[in-house]
Image (cartoon, rainbow, N blue to C red):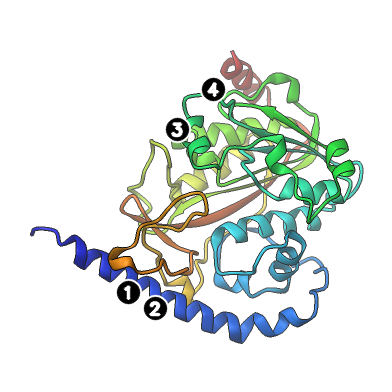
Amino acid sequence: MPTDTARDLALTWGLKSQGSELAQRLFNERIAPRLKVPPSKPGCVPLTSKLCESADIESDWFLYWCHQLRMAPIYHRKVWEDCFALQVISECDLLRPGVRAISFGVGSEPLPSLLAREGVSVLATDLPPDAPAAAEWIATDQHGSAARLFRPDIVDREAFDRLVAFRALDMNQIPPDLAGQFDLCWSLCALEHVGTTDLAMRFVLKSMQCLRPGGIAVHTTEFNLSSNARTLTSGPTVLFTRFQIEHLVEELQAAGHEVFAVNYSPGSAPLDQYVDLPPFPNSALTTVSPFLLSVPQAPHLRLALGGYVTTSIGLVVRRGGVVSAASARNATTESG
């Protein structure tokens, strides 16, 4: 059947408009009235490793961290990733002076500024700018640098300069001098861009070596809601199936680490069933709409990507006190 571009674009914009209207109504009913008073710091939820859900967006902990980050509490998985990571960090008592943290694929995240405000020392890393894979991130203004990480609305310059450092680093080649140096490491939707799902899983395992025993890792990545068998295993963006996540959990446990139990529930609320379609608005890109229509800000908890429906999953791992000899040999071999 021949394609009808105008029809497809009109259907996409119609669906986006309906989703935007639903999200705005839910926001006005469930979130906006609670924003009249600054939210109080939440206690322990407690969070586990889990999928992004609309119920999280409407939670007290999510609203609190959005307020701290100076971000609008919208139904968007990227905002969820920032808030999920911060709630985990807070629950693990790592949001305090003396804590040392490392971030991978940091881009322009606000977390380094917020952690520095609380006295945490942060080593933020991103791809070397001359790496071939960095070209696209630079072109879309998503590549990290020390200058881009400073958020004056969150932290003062003196604290930021004293506590935040930046280092160019390839996630596929974590240098050995970082081993055992940190209490916390995190990456937010970065590991799915390292080339393949196998490389991404190897990164998670190797990132644990940066932690001291008992240290916490928080990683978010793409989760395939469509299939547990077929997925994107290589390319600019890979998607993890539940089977692959379970395999990664087994690998982490075999290396002596504790993985916080994974909740695979996708949620059942209306916005948990809504799938956003491309094009996805990005402040760094110009989006041309059909018939000169404006791009609706549709809810973005689930999206169509590469022929699959995907969302974000957050994994929380505590480093064990002892790493097996086999894991140490493998790490040495891979570093070489």
Q: Which residue is mark 3?
A: 195
**Amino acid on which disc 3 is placed:** Gly
**Amino acid on which disc 1 is placed:** Gly
Earlier sequence position, callout 4 versus callout 3: 4
State which quadrant residue 209 falls in: top right
Question: On screen, 25 above or below 255?
Answer: below
Give the position of the C terminus as an image quadrant: top right
**Amino acid on which disc 4 is placed:** Asp
Residue 58 location (% of width, % of height): 63, 75
Q: CA distance from mark 4 to mark 2?
A: 42 Å
Q: Which residue is mark 2?
A: 18
**Amino acid on which disc 2 is placed:** Gln
Q: CA distance from mark 4 to mark 3?
A: 17 Å
Q: Secondary structure at mark 2?
A: helix
Q: Which residue is mark 1?
A: 14
State which quadrant residue 327 falls in: top right
Give the position of the N terminus as an image quadrant: bottom left
Q: CA distance from mark 1 to mark 2?
A: 6 Å
Q: Nearer the viewer, residue 294 or 38?
A: 294
Q: Which residue is mark 4?
A: 130
Q: Badge 2: how crowded within 10 Å, few (<14), some, or many (20+)?
A: some
Q: Do tag 4 and tag 2 residues touch (Cβ < 8 Å)?
A: no
